[in-house]
Image (cartoon, rainbow, N blue to C red):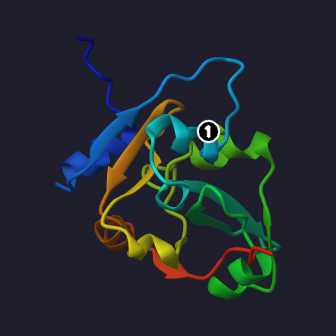
């Protein structure tokens, strides 16, 4: 069996002695890079698989938001959650320089710098959530309470309401 190469996110969790599991899935060049596809690959509900999104404020402060893959950020709620007037999504081309991660492999753990992070409050409804392990095809499953505490994140309602 091929030994898995640990990502930065995994090494950080190991060092902090936080329990987690690694789930991998096959990803081919033409596969969509979206969380719903990932949830299907993992055979997990879309509500417990989370995506990591990065925003920037008008004064160039970066903020990380972690939400279920089937939901969409509400930028007004996000701004309120981080006490900013306004935030907007960063451009995809900024993702690697800002976070150290590529689109589809962005983890809330192990970015180049620690940015204020907010999880959607529903993360606390689960004993285990899944989020990117730091590369496409790799997800980490862990207790959200442990992750939120470890990275000094908070929770809030930060998504658009479904019609």
Residue that carries the numbered disc 1 in the rendered image = 37
Q: Position of residue 21 (x, y in %)?
A: 27, 44
Q: Residue at x 64, y 49 (%)?
A: 98
Q: Is residue 72 above or below residue 137?
A: below
Q: Position of residue 66 (x, y in %)?
A: 56, 63
Total marks shown come to: 1
- Outermost residue on the top side: it is 1
Choose between 35 and 20: the one closer to the eye.
35
Choose between 144 and 5: the one closer to the eye.
144
Image quarter hosting the C terminus: bottom right
Left or right: residue 31 versus residue 153 is: right
Residue 51: image quadrant is bottom right
Residue 1: image quadrant is top left
Q: Position of residue 147 (x, y in %)?
A: 34, 64
Q: Is residue 111 above or below residue 66?
A: above
Q: Is residue 24 above or below residue 85?
A: above
Q: Residue at x 69, y 74 (%)?
A: 159
Q: Secondary structure at mark 1?
A: helix
Residue 103: image quadrant is top right
Left or right: residue 7 versus residue 13 is: right
Q: Residue at x 61, y 46 (%)?
A: 35
Choose between 129 and 52: the one closer to the eye.
129
Could you classify mark 1 by the number of other residues whose Cα lies within 10 Å: few (under 14), some (14-19), or many (20 or more)? some
Q: Is residue 145 above or below residue 13?
A: below
Q: Position of residue 107 (x, y in %)?
A: 50, 49
């Amino acid at each position: 069996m091929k030994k898995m190469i640990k990502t930065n996110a995994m090494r950080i969790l190991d060092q902090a002695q936080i329990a987690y599991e690694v789930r991998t899935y096959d990803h081919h060049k033409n596969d969509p890079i979206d969380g719903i596809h990932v949830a299907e690959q993992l055979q997990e509900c879309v509500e417990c698989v989370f995506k990591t999104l990065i925003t920037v404020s008008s004064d160039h402060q970066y903020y990380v938001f972690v939400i279920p893959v089937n939901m969409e950020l509400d930028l007004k709620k996000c701004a309120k959650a981080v006490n900013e007037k306004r935030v907007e999504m960063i451009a995809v081309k900024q993702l690697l320089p800002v976070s150290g991660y590529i689109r589809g492999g962005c983890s809330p753990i192990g970015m180049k710098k620690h940015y204020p992070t907010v999880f959607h409050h529903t993360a606390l409804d689960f004993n285990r959530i899944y989020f990117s392990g730091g590369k496409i095809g790799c997800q980490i499953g862990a207790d959200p309470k442990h992750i939120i505490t470890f990275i000094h994140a908070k929770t809030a309602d930060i998504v658009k309401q479904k019609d």
